[in-house]
Amino acid sequence: MSDTEIDPPALERVAAIHSFRPASMRERALDDLGFIRATMERTSSYRAVPGWGGVRMGFVALAATPFAITADTPSRWFLTWMLAAAVGTSIGAFEMLRKARFEGVSLFTGAGSRFAKALAPGLITGGLLTIVLHQIGQFDLLPAVWLLCYGTAVVGAGAHSIRAVRSMGLCFMLVGALALLGMVFVPDSRLAGDVCMALGFGLMHVVFGIGIARDRDV
């Protein structure tokens, strides 16, 4: 074989090497993109928080407050706040789903899933305590329980969302603490609880909702 002749098996080996390199680079690039995407999903925060939805929830609580204050029996008082909670929760869920759809995000994957999972334990705890306290007739404790559990849930969810959510959760916890103190230092503990409910579920939702809406709402 002369110096100018090329061994056919050698040609096949060279061709195989060159055909392998682009595929390997593409696979590595795809792996890198997958890693980057997964990292961004883990570190991203859930921003589809409805500001105007929060304002509407606040107005529902404010509208329910006079009816709760003037309720002549604990059962009617409880029913008033349960109806307000049902309406407010429906508004909040609808607005959150609407905004998530508008921004192209999901509550079931990524940051949205972490937000929902962090929110759920506090809300479930509040629901269970509500059932027990209602059964044993401890109605005066309910405003503090509702405010504290909701605030705890929002603070937890806020770790995966914007700063305003965390701040709102802390304010709810503070108002819940005031509701507990009202049971000790205020003669009419039920009135104190209703005022704290209006301050928390009413005013706080409105104030923080407007702030969120100015920044990022639709």
Image (cartoon, grey):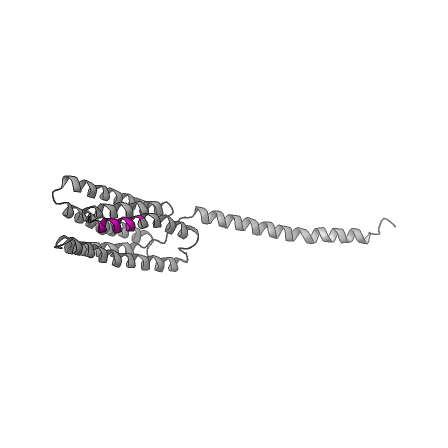
Determine which quarter of the picture holds residue 171.
top left
User: Is 99 placed above or below 138 here?
Assistant: below
- Residue 130 inside the magenta-drawn segment: yes
Residue 162 seen in the figure: no
- Residue found at x 14% / y 48%: 191
Q: How many marks?
A: 0
Residue 123: x, y in percent? 31, 50
Q: Answer left or right for 14 relative to 133.
A: right
- Residue found at x 49% / y 50%: 37
Q: Answer left or right for 66 relative to 120.
A: left
Q: Which residues are magenta?
A: 125-135
Q: Where, quadrant-wise, is the C terminus in this rendering? A: bottom left
Along the line of sight, the residue nearer the viewer: 16 or 148: 148
- Residue 164 inside the magenta-drawn segment: no
- Residue found at x 35% / y 50%: 120
Along the line of sight, the residue nearer the viewer: 168 or 11: 168
Residue 149 seen in the figure: yes
Residue 91: x, y in percent? 28, 59
